[in-house]
Amino acid sequence: MLVVRTVLQLSAEVPAEWQIWATYISVAIAAGSFIVALFSSRTARQSLKLSKEQERRRVARLDVSLVKAVSWCPVNSKQRWIGARVLAVNPTDRDGAIVQADLHVTYSTSDGANVVAKIPHDPMGTCFPKGIEEFDLPISLPANGAVDGWLVFGLSHALLEGVTVERYEAVVRDSRGPLESVHPWVLEEIEDCEASKEAEGAESEDQGQENDISN
């Protein structure tokens, strides 16, 4: 009881002007504390967002897009070849590699059965037409990088005989786990390498004859 009376007496003895200033100071301190807490919360949210973004960029991803699709049939060959030029992009901060590629050929037989044949990428299978630079798998795919090249698949005539091909799907496997695919719906028919060589030889021969005539 004596303590309460002493406090009341001291409060009564403090000038009113000082009491007003004390109120202002208390409000300023409270406002400052609120602003600091607000900025701290905002900084924490930004740090969390950045951390999540960095973690997301380390999750394995693979983006594959089809640039061009062609088909050719070498002379005296038992196979028809399909080439798919693809652009493979690694949009993450982890290195990867393309380790496998297959062509899934979906077709129906005369008796109505649906079949899916898996044809592996075969860079050593034939003499490829001019301009086709095939992938030699595995091929490295650096972080935030990309590679551009051809996947090539040999389909035997026996496989295609008497069937109706419904779909081609080139499936690419990344060393980190992801699988991506592209669908070569439209195949451009091109000359095989032997035909290209014959055409180039005939062109060179004609050019030589023209030079002899002019001389």
Image: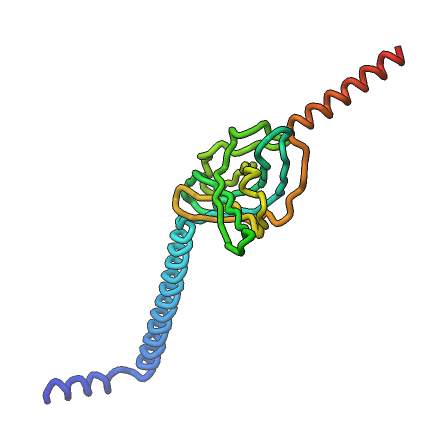
Question: Can you name the residue that lies furthest to the top here?
Answer: 215
- Of 210 and 29, nearer the camera is 210
Q: Is residue 195 above or below residue 190?
A: above
Q: Residue at x 65, y 31 (%)?
A: 192
Query: From this viewpoint, is residue 207 visible?
Result: yes
Q: Residue at x 46, y 38 (%)?
A: 141
Residue 139 at x, y percent in the picture: 46, 35
Residue 153, image quadrant? top right
Q: Residue at x 67, y 42 (%)?
A: 188
Residue 99, image quadrant? top left
- Of 125 and 139, nearer the camera is 125
Residue 106 at x, y percent in the picture: 53, 50
Question: Is the N terminus in the top left, top right, bottom left or bottom right quadrant?
Answer: bottom left
Residue 61 at x, y percent in the picture: 44, 49
Question: Can you name the residue that lies furthest to the front here?
Answer: 111
Q: Is residue 10 above or below residue 169?
A: below
Query: From this viewpoint, is residue 148 visible?
Result: no
- Of 15 and 166, nearer the camera is 166
Question: Is the C terminus in the top left, top right, bottom left or bottom right quadrant?
Answer: top right
- Of 159 and 202, nearer the camera is 159
Residue 92 at x, y percent in the picture: 45, 47
Residue 96, image quadrant? top left
